Amino acid sequence: MLLSAPLAMQAQSIKVTLLGTGAPPPVLDRFGPSTLIEAGPEKIVIDAGRGASQRLWQLGIPLGTVTAVFLTHLHSDHTVGLPDLWLTGWINNRYGGRTTPFQVYGPAGTADMMANLEKAYAWDIKTREEDEKLPAQGVAIAAKDIAAGVVYEKNGVKVTAFNTDHGALIKPTLGYRIDFGGHSVVVTGDTRPGDDIVRASKGVDVMIHEVAFA
């Protein structure tokens, strides 16, 4: 999905790729929820469901070149691909190559989740650093809990988080609006309709609204 601009603005276009649109069932024909947004030099991934890394590499995109990951919420089907994207993206190969910290943003609990992943994979990290001489900065994690508002501005790309309604007991959950070069995209994540979504989506070029049960 390419949002094209006039010829003089082609470098300012946004490219959106649905890496996966599935739900928890482990089927082969629909990978887990994940969306890639390419805007200028930024490669932003929203959610990292099952198979996100394979889909990125199918596009020829080294995992280590992903700029930042934004999580809509912490359900496993939206996060189970994170260890793969993080650790495989660190390996010194054409599909990896990350040399700077892995940037992850999400609702409250995100930083704790990533800290615990570091503990869970401590043996792998230590072994690869010693055996393969991989750079420590490439496996470092920069995780941040965020709330509604502007949460990221870099290279002309602005990411704004907004609240969503995934259910009374499933809080907090977020959607994201990405603006770049006069174009905009909204990714809602799992949610019911709501006023915050309407406000965030006003005037956008593309809106991606996830639906599991209609």
Image (spheres, rainbow, N blue to C red):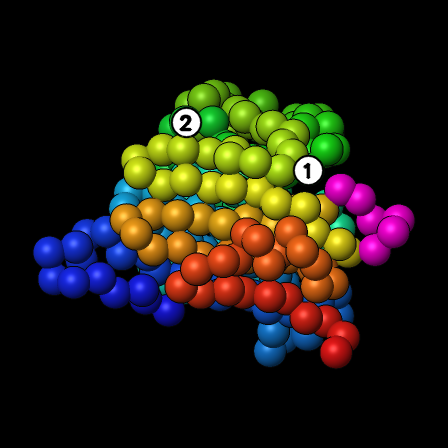
x then y, percent, for residue 87 = 54, 39
x then y, percent, for residue 24 = 75, 65
Residue at 38% across, 28% down: 99
Q: Judge depth for marks 2 and 1 and give the one in front.
A: 1
Residue 13 appears in the figure: yes
In the picture, the quarter occupied by the C terminus is bottom right
- Report the side of 15 relative to 31 (left or right): left
x then y, percent, for residue 124 = 61, 32
- The span shown in magenta is 167-172
Q: Which residue is mark 2?
A: 100
Q: Which residue is mark 1?
A: 107
User: Disc 2 on helix, strand or loop?
Assistant: loop
Residue at 34% across, 55% down: 183
Residue at 41% across, 40% down: 158
Residue at 39% across, 48% down: 179
User: Disc 1 on helix, strand or loop?
Assistant: loop
Residue 6 found in image quarter: bottom left
x then y, percent, for residue 13 = 27, 56
Is 169 a magenta residue? Answer: yes
